[in-house]
Amino acid sequence: MDKEVSMPLGVVVERREIDNPWQDWSWRPVAVIPGAPDVEAWTELSSDSVSVRYHAATLPLTLHRKETEAYRQNLSNNPPVVYVVLEPDDQPDTVYDYKPSSVTVSPYEAQDSLDSGEEIVEGVTMPDGMIGWVQAFVDAHHVDEPFKKRKRKRYATHDVEFGKPPPIAKKRGSRGDH
């Protein structure tokens, strides 16, 4: 198996009407579509009286062999999730407040995305076929790293003499005022 593998994931975003004086809609990712084709623009998938679901984008999900510990952590959740990151869309001509920017199955990477406070980071249930794909990658690449306790460095006690005046108390010159 390769050191990294990718899969295209379609991101499904829901726009829901809310009762709020400052905001008309709430935006949140609700699903992913494994192997989805690229989309040029947001495509409406379903709607009802208070919400609309869109296939907003298709983004690559890339697994890296050095991050298998994070993937194992996610797979131990019930259910495992795919983290979707939505960032504010600042384009003046858009009707969508957010746009999908990335997808990951690493909870550590998702946590890093929360640092700015502007993005929406939500976990959506990982489809069953993806669970097997991620598990196979982890099985092929995970190596347990044993815990290594740091050894204390010995302090060189012979350099410090008890009772010796500190260097600042020594006479520096022949000014005569000491």
Image (cartoon, grey):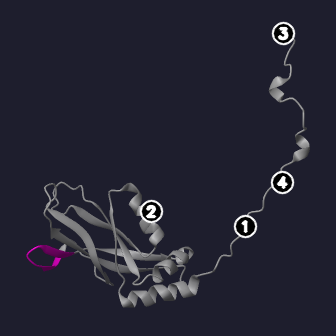
Horizontal side of residue 144 vs 97, given as left or right? right
Dot 4: element: loop
Horizontal side of residue 142 vs 11, given as left or right? right
Horizontal side of residue 47 vs 111, given as left or right? left
Which residue does the numbered mark 4 point to in the structure image?
154
| The N terminus: image quadrant | bottom right
C-alpha distance separating marks 1 and 3 = 53 Å
C-alpha distance separating marks 2 and 4 = 37 Å
Which residues, given as a range, are shown in magenta? Answer: 44-54
C-alpha distance separating marks 2 and 1 = 27 Å
Neighbour tally class for label 1: few under 14, some 14-19, many 20 plus, Cα within 10 Å: few
N-terminal-most mark, 2 or 4: 2
Dot 3: element: loop
State the residue lying farthest toward the top: 176
Name the amino acid type tagged 1: Lys
Which residue does the numbered mark 1 point to in the structure image?
149
The residue under the point 68% across, 72% down is 147
Name the amino acid type tagged 4: Arg
In terms of depth relative to the viewer, which is nearer, 5 or 82? 82
Residue 20: x percent and y percent? 15, 59
Horizontal side of residue 112 vs 139, given as left or right? left
Q: Is residue 8 magenta?
A: no
Placement of 17 over or under 78, stated as above or below: above
